[in-house]
Amino acid sequence: MLKVGIIGFGKMGKIRYDAINASGKAQVVSIYDTNINMIGDNLRVSGSIDELINNDNIDTVFVCTPNFLNKDVTIKSLLRGKHVFCEKPPAFNYNEMCEIKEAETKSGRKLMYGFNHRHHDSIKMIKEMIDSKTYGKVLWMRGRYGKSVDHNFYNTWRADKKKAGGGILIDQGIHMLDLFLYLGGTFDQVCSFVSKLYWSLDIEDNVFAIYKNNQTGLVASLHSTMTQWRHLFSLEIFLEKGYFVLNGLKTPSGTYGEEKLTIARNRSSAPAADWKDEEHITFDVDNSWQSEVNYFLNCIIENNPVLIGNSTDAIELMKTIDKTYEENKYEG
């Protein structure tokens, strides 16, 4: 069995811990967190990040730290000969991601990122249908991802740009943007409005962005917000011969409602469409966390390349994140 160390034992560290144990493929042998009381008496604790990384009994490291630590901990772990799974964001920008890629290449180890939404059963189904070309090519996509925060947000590291790297885009919108890239391909043009409409912080609370692939003509529209007041996930994909609409997402918090996928299979001739053409599928179980961890562990055990959520995906994502911030047209 693989021997795993987890750095960071907050919400994500605990989710990964449970998935690793349930996999039957690996064993968590040590954990590090600045708050030792979060870990529990029955778990082995490392005294520092470096102590865990330098532990010769550990071959795989899960990085579940605040954003500002992700890059350095990943690079250190890779160069120490560890396979690495790291939560999003992979880094603060494209240049930092290139540094990580260099370390990965030098180490020869496996590296995967926690773009968890790719592993939801609904997204897997959408991806299969797009790749099958049954509905023709994707014409356009629209994604809305919003949540509500209260004044307690000021007391978290996510409200500090130096620790978070940005606001709602790098925190939550990054997942939707990753799905755009996963399902629609890369983007050449970006136009964005990155604003601080309400919370008066050094980070954005709303992002409105349009992305275009010049080769295919595909356009994607993103709204990422922390002034939604009611948590919302909505992904719409319209193709030549139909559409997929995913509303809601099964999450540990349950705040995004039911995960419901609507598919137009036998639509009438354009431009008319009728509600009776639609098929509705509800995904009652969230298998994404287990699926994601199993996939990564299998890549290591079977010595297969990481094809989903790899460093190449992360580089393209951070390049697009950079463009979104750079092309900001918002004034005020």
Image (cartoon, rainbow, N blue to C red):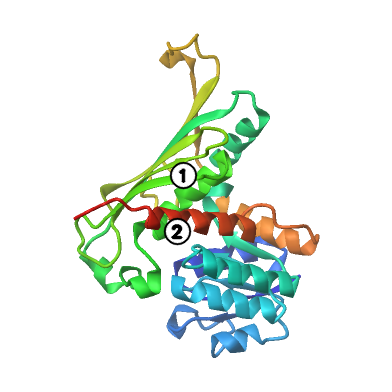
User: Residue 322: which disc?
Assistant: 2
Question: Is residue 231 shown above or below 280?
Answer: below
Q: Does residue 135 appear in this view? A: yes
Q: Decide which of 193, 88 is in the foreground and name it.
A: 193
Q: Quadrant of the C terminus?
A: bottom left
The answer for how far apart the CA atoms under marks 1 and 2 are is 12 Å
Q: Earlier in the sequence, mark 1 or mark 2?
A: 1
Question: Is residue 290 shown above or below 99?
Answer: above
Crowding near the residue tagged with mark 2, few <14, some 14–19, many ≥20 C-alpha atoms within 10 Å: some
Q: Decide which of 251, 125 is in the foreground and name it.
A: 125
Residue type beneath disc 2: Asp
Q: Is residue 24 left or right of residue 85?
A: right
Identify the residue under disc 1: 189
Q: Does residue 121 appear in this view? A: no
* Residue at position x 52%, y 72% in the image: 70
Q: Decide which of 81, 254 is in the foreground and name it.
A: 81
Q: How many marks?
A: 2
Considering every residue shown, the one lying at the far right of the view is 302
Instruction: Tell me where residue 271 appears, x and y as whole percent.
Output: 43, 12
Residue type beneath disc 1: Gln
Q: Quadrant of the N terminus?
A: bottom right
* Residue at position x 75%, y 57% in the image: 305
Crowding near the residue tagged with mark 1, few <14, some 14–19, many ≥20 C-alpha atoms within 10 Å: some
Instruction: Tell me where residue 89 appears, x and y as whole percent.
Output: 49, 63
